[in-house]
Image (cartoon, rainbow, N blue to C red):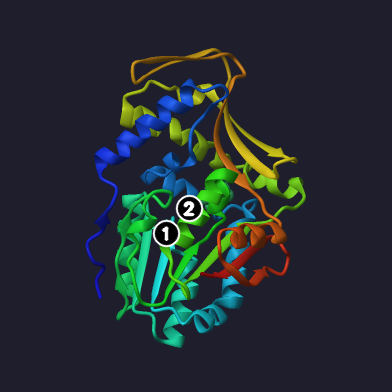
Amino acid sequence: MSAEPLEIHLEEQDLSRSLRDDVRTGLTAQPRWLPPKWFYDARGSELFEQITRLPEYYPTRAERAVLAERADTIAEVTGAKTLIELGAGSSEKTRLLLDAFTRHGGLGTFVPLDVSVSALRQSTAEIAADYPGLRVRGIVGDFTRHLDRLPAGGRRLVIFLGGTIGNLLPAERAEFLAAMRAALEAGDWLLIGTDLVKDPAVIVPAYDDAAGVTAEFNRNVLRVINRELGADFDPEAFAHVALWDPDREWIEMRLRARWPVRVRVLGLDVGFDAGEELRTEVSAKFRPEGIAAELRAAGFAVPDFWTDPDGLFGVTLARA
Ligand code: AVJ
């Protein structure tokens, strides 16, 4: 089947309004910050795809290893009729699940949801072409806001891969999981990928690669703000920083002003001292017992947790 037209739950005006709100809030805060969802315009999505192929960036390969080993079990245990993917991006690893569901039978609909129209347009067309018989309904939306818009009924499996849940702050994460549980019915399933706590000597290079792709990805948020809001950031005035926070067990990406910088945006005059930093992403790393506890607190049962052979990345299957 060809993919259905994308369902737009996030209009252009909507997107630019929330970008404006986020930029105004984050750039007038001290310390300054921006939410990571604004990395992903067409160029940012492409840079992220490049990151997933870097030698230092282990999460994608490790998660793929878990899915390759467990996809048949997941298809069998859940018996899902509808597969919903949050923050789907290219849905590249999701094909392992789609293949398993094809062997198992019974899956009728695939619903990828993402903020990036360009990524969704490409992935829905490719998946519809490669999985004849599967209904593909792409939704342009924000998983922190549009969980009430997911298609109802059938036995649903919602997947949230790549460790993207780690990009939410702890309070946002609890809110997200509670909203997720409220959006599901008893008997629906949730599959979550989480990067695991490990030696920072392994984690830090994954966010500060030798080829500088992550640095470009990080600076891309400034290009997005320049284009969408007419700001005048000089991306080259900011150095990429990746920092492990041992207490909160997360990695932070920051942009550090190399020299004093002044930026005009939204009628604001934002000054950065030399060395001043802007936080652009938090990527939390998890412990198995922590993931299970957070899911249980949100009202899920947690029957299964798997890792890759090296124990780098975890995939949890939870039941509403
Ligand atoms: C979107 C969660 C997969 O936090 O690892 C990659 C994004 N940031 N390199 C992550 C990201 C820097 C990524 N995920």
- The residue under label 1 is 90
Q: Is residue 290 above or below residue 28?
A: below
Residue 112 has which mark? none
* Residue at the farthest bottom position: 104
Instruction: Say which amino acid is labelled 2.
Output: Glu
Q: Is residue 240 above or below residue 122?
A: above
**Mark 2 residue element:** helix
Q: Are marks 1 and 2 in contact (CB under 8 Å)?
A: yes
Q: Quadrant of the N terminus?
A: bottom left
Mark 2 surroundings within 10 Å by alpha-carbon count, few (fewer than 14), some (14 through 19), many (20 or more)? some
User: At 31% across and 58% down in the image, what residue appears?
Assistant: 139
Instruction: Say which amino acid is labelled 1.
Output: Ser
Q: Position of residue 222 (x, y in %)?
A: 44, 30
Cα separation between marks 1 and 2? 8 Å
User: At 37% across and 62% down in the image, what residue appears?
Assistant: 112
- The residue under label 2 is 49
Mark 1 surroundings within 10 Å by alpha-carbon count, few (fewer than 14), some (14 through 19), many (20 or more)? many
